[in-house]
Amino acid sequence: LRGTWYPNETASLGVIVSRGDEATDLGAGVVALAEVRSFALVGRMQLGRGYGLTGALSHTRQGSFYTRTGASVGVQRDF
């Protein structure tokens, strides 16, 4: 599920929520299904003609195997 808000023509802010099952190889031929849940806040802001600044904050949990939380920032070039 994803929703995006556009406060003006040069910016966006979005939310992504997902849930599902993923097969995980435990080794020695053992495969387990893990419930995966993810949540992210994403955004983009235009810096100038053809360039934008992107960013995201995210959190993912894959069953009891691992939890990952992170942030990213980038520059996007439109062409």
Image (tube, grey):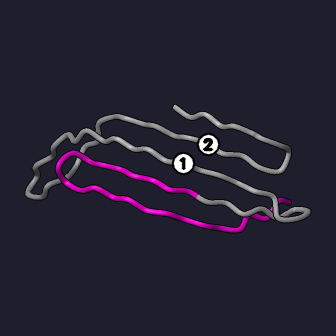
The residue shown at (37%, 35%) is 19
Count of labels shown? 2
Residue type, label 2? Gly
Which label sits on residue 15?
A: none
The residue shown at (42%, 37%) is 18
Which label sits on residue 14?
A: 2
Which image quadrant for residue 35?
Answer: top left
Q: Position of residue 55 (x, y in %)?
A: 61, 60
Residue 61 relative to residue 2: left or right: left
Residue 69 falls inside the magenta stretch? yes
Q: Position of residue 11 (x, y in %)?
A: 77, 49
Q: Give the residue at mark 1.
A: 41
The residue shown at (15%, 43%) is 32
Q: Position of residue 51 (x, y in %)?
A: 82, 64
Residue 55 relative to residue 44: left or right: left
Q: Quadrant of the C terminus?
A: bottom right
Residue 49 falls inside the magenta stretch? no
The residue shown at (34%, 41%) is 37
Which image quadrant for residue 27?
Answer: bottom left
Residue 39 relative to residue 6: left or right: left
Check disc 1 and report its element: helix, strand or loop. Answer: strand
What is the magenta range? 56-79
Disc 1 vs disc 2: Cβ atoms closer than 8 Å? yes
Residue type, label 1? Leu
Pointer 1: residues within 10 angstroms few (<14), some, or many (20+)? some
Magenta-colored segment: predominant secondary structure:
strand
